[in-house]
Amino acid sequence: MIKAIHQEKHGFYLINQNQKLNNSLLKYSKYCLNNTNLDDDFLDVVTQLLTGLKKILIDANLTDSINSEFKVELEINKIPTKGWSIEDVIQNIILNYLGNVPNYSAGYAPLNVIPPPLIPAILAKFACAIINPNLVYESYAGKAIEAEQLAISHLAEIIGFEPKISGGYFTSGGSASNYWAVRCALEKAFPGLGEKGFKAFSNQEPVVIQSVLGHYTNVNAARLLGIGTENVISVSVTPDFSISLPAFQSQMEKAIKENKQVVCIYLIAGQTDSFGVDDVKGVVRICEELCRKYHVPKPHIHVDAAVGWVYSIFKNYQITDNSLGFSTDTLDVIRKLNNLYSSLSYADSITVDPHKHGFTAYTSSALIFKNKRDLLLLQKDFHETPYFTEDIFCSFPGAYTPESSRPGDGPLMILANLYALGYEGYQTMIGYAIQQSIIFQSKLQFSFKNSVQVLNQNVPGTSTLWRFYPPGMEAQEAYNRELLGTSEEDCNFTQKINEYNHNLFAKSKNMRSHNTPILGYSHQVIVNKSGMPISAWKCIIINPFVNILSIIDNLHILLDMVVEN
């Protein structure tokens, strides 16, 4: 006889002939949420989780106790035969494996472009985890589809695109956005590439041009899309970390004369370490001149503004009124930012990462096209997705997005922040971060005088890169030698200073303790005249609670310890 067991609390029936199976279903189905299950029990376990997270945030100590021998974990931990209690899962799984992550909300970890997620974004992500929309398709996402469209429209307005004409979608991260911008560029250059494959190239050799500081994902895009890493042309940069226009013109003209087809020009607005900005308008002007001269098609212009997009929020800030009371130096930086970022509108597509300067949690990243018709170049054929055709009138972003599984948290998090902060809130947060960065650079130079060189002092933003030099060495003179020297002796000198700084950074990691400032380090922030990478320390101030004096004090302790030894 079939038994129907009614679980009143959860509001559903479990129907089965076997009592043992019924009992087991009742035991484990309690973890399913339904329209009646956001009750006190759920709130209790959420409270337990938040209590545990609070302890983690207080006790966070980064990497000092991470076990590098992961085999130990594999040997000790096995999937249990019978499930654990939710309390054990919280303590031994969720909290255990979130331990030793820097508390980015506390302000002691300005090591990279990782902001403290704001409460509106956290709530949006939490809500999305419960509702679980999939943006591939309107039937799976409901109004979350509208949230994505609205978020793209608002971000397009910020970066200088016309919202009604532009279009785009949220991706799995900036890397994916860059990949698919290059994919669009290929389809423009070689119509039908999606169907014909490499045969569409015919005898033409596609190339991509970028600065030598271009993000590594662009090289990987060439690898994945069949362009080949050998066909990525890297152009030298100026001392302010932007692409050299004369060098760009020379390299593009050379490629055209060699009968190569330049399919994409990849530029940066906010280089990962230095926050350097390429002259988009200048590159577009040179590009158009060369295309007219040699009667070749204009390549797709893509700008990776994953880091720098947010600086466009100052375009409507009335500097003369200065309603937020920024310092004179900060206002000078805002003027420079407005000048640099006003040329984003010359791009054909732009990568935007709200999970960087947008104060959302991971992942919130978008690819935005100036003209939404470019999305058609990525569109799948109707017959390829038969399971998404139940309603021909619905919105179907999955027709042009690479992923079929896209959560709704990306757009909803940035929308929540945009509406909670508004322009004024973002201008306040980013403006203060700029002001703190200016102060930090000033104190760094004052405290260490001739033994430190700030590398990106003339680049506006919230990043500071610097190199330390051994006692008795004049930093400015030494850095000029590193940057411009070409002899073997100069290269050896640069390598020596690279090693000196890396060893200092390694010692600083060993000094870490509770809430010790955690700084970043990059092995290549710029390339010198000989093509040799120059490394640097970095501090990227986004969090308003970063303690500048604590960073300076800890650097003093580090250098004093080195001198004593």
Image (cartoon, rainbow, N blue to C red):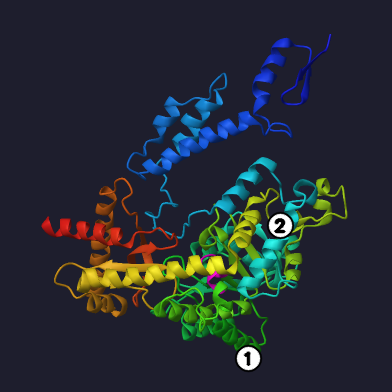
- Local secondary structure at mark 1: helix
Residue drawn at (63%, 30%) of the image: 40
**Residue occupying the far left of the picture:** 564
Residue 382 located within the stretch drawn in magenta: no
Counting from the top left corner in percent of width and height, residue 295 is at 67, 87
Mark 1–mark 2 contact, CB under 8 Å?
Answer: no
Residue position for label 1: 293
**Three-letter amino acid code at disc 1?**
Lys
Classify the position of the N terminus by image quarter. top right
Q: Is residue 226 visible?
A: no
Counting from the top left corner in percent of width and height, residue 247 is at 47, 83
Judging depth in this view, the residue of 294 and 508 nearest the camera is 508
Judging depth in this view, the residue of 353 and 41 nearest the camera is 41
Residue position for label 2: 147
Q: Quadrant of residue 84 in the image? A: top right
Counting from the top left corner in percent of width and height, residue 273 is at 42, 66
Residue span colored magenta: 304-312
Above or below: residue 446 compared with residue 92: below
